[in-house]
Image: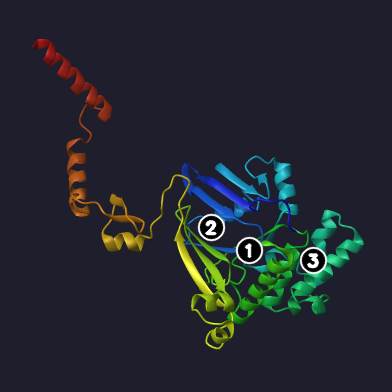
Amino acid sequence: MMASNGPMILCDNLVKIYKVQDLEVVALQGLDLMVDRGEFMAIVGPSGSGKSSLMNILGGLDRPSAGRAIVDGQDLLKLSTFALTRYRRQKVGFVWQQPSRNLVPYLSVEENVELPMIVAGMPYKERKSWTREMLEAVGLWERRHHNLQQLSGGEQQRTAIAVALANKPVLLLADEPTGEVDTTTAQTIMDTLRYLNQQYGLTIVMVTHDQRVSNQVDRVVTIRDGRTSSERVRRLRTVEEGAAQEDMTPSEHERQVAPIEEAFHEYVVLDYAGRLQIPREFLDALGISDRAQVELTEQGILIKPAAGLLDTTAQAARVSQVAEMWGPQRGSKDWRLRLGDASRGLRGLLRRR
């Protein structure tokens, strides 16, 4: 399933604006994101942060308003309508929270998986071979003749995964794939996705709110207010690495710790202009509102409250006072007219002198 070199996904200063009647809603505000080939990553964030907008753009269901969204070497902003349709059919597979969005209820498991290949014109032998391979990969080959009503929720979701991979895409987008199943079934789905990721080098981008699920992917990217805010990377440490760090032999270390340890490293993401999205709880704890001081130290960059400024309450009162003093006046349309009047009056005084 893998293709050329370079990252699978590159989003550069990505912007998406929706127009609702006379209002414009900015869903993505210069989002930057890079996803390597074969990476299994998750996207998290509060409602309205831009996760769904990003997934729709990556899936070719929507076009960005500005910036770049390049998937497998194709700039989605520049594709024609026909090329975008071909991209959806050939490059990307979808798995939704509701399996029914991928499945036809009156077809069997095998027929559901074959259907996209029939539409794409795949030869009979290749179609049958790939159908079997996919159903074996998701653990459903023995239930290939069952109707959907005879399957559990987890089995339906695994069937939907096989359907999403029917046309051999290079990218799988999963929107809350474990959102409607219990914990045990959710783990089975995650194990299936991990197997496909490792076996076929499949790049997987998943949106989730489940902390247990997000802990099992390679990287977690948090989106806030339409921008990438932070990322958390999962790293595995083997017995030999742990022994070397603790100055033990591998056999001594193995008796004391598990063969593989997980470590999570969280980073704040810099955008193309060098801006940071610092977590709100950090800013609140330090009392930082609209300005801060930045210093370069031996340990790194130090961010602290700006010294010599009024507190936020005093600032608000001062802004209110200035706004009232310079507010609308009778006979003036805006502040530019008032400034012009003041300039003319000053010139008159100077001429009199």
Please give left or right for residue 277 compared with residue 203 in the image: left
Q: SS class of the residue under badge 2?
A: helix
Amino acid type of the residue tagged 1 in the rendering: Ala
Alpha carbons under labels 2 and 3: distance apart: 28 Å
Spot occupied by residue 232 in the image (x, y as percentages of width and height):
50, 65
Badge 2, how many Cα within 10 Å: few under 14, some, many 20+? many
Q: From this viewpoint, is residue 108 visible?
A: no
For the residues labelled 1 and 3, say whether their Cβ atoms are less than 8 Å apart.
no
Q: From this viewpoint, is residue 139 visible?
A: yes
Quarter of the figure with the N terminus: bottom right
| Residue 174: mark in rendering | 1
Question: Toward which corner of the image does residue 42 lie, by quadrant?
Answer: bottom right
Spot occupied by residue 50 in the image (x, y as percentages of width and height):
51, 55
- Residue at 28% x, 53% y: name it: 289
Question: Toward which corner of the image does residue 351 lie, by quadrant?
Answer: top left
Amino acid type of the residue tagged 3 in the rendering: Val
Q: SS class of the residue under badge 1?
A: strand
Alpha carbons under labels 2 and 1: distance apart: 12 Å
Front-most of residues 212 and 151: 212
First in residue order: circle 1 vs circle 3: 3
- Residue at 66% x, 57% y: name it: 37
Alpha carbons under labels 1 and 3: distance apart: 17 Å
Please give left or right for residue 79 compared with residue 315 in the image: right
Badge 1, how many Cα within 10 Å: few under 14, some, many 20+? many
First in residue order: circle 2 vs circle 3: 2
For the residues labelled 2 and 1, say whether their Cβ atoms are less than 8 Å apart.
no
| Residue 287: mark in rendering | none
| Residue 113: mark in rendering | 3
Front-most of residues 178 and 32: 32
Between disc 1 and disc 3, the foreground one is: 1
- Residue at 76% x, 72% y: name it: 137
Residue beneath disc 2? 51
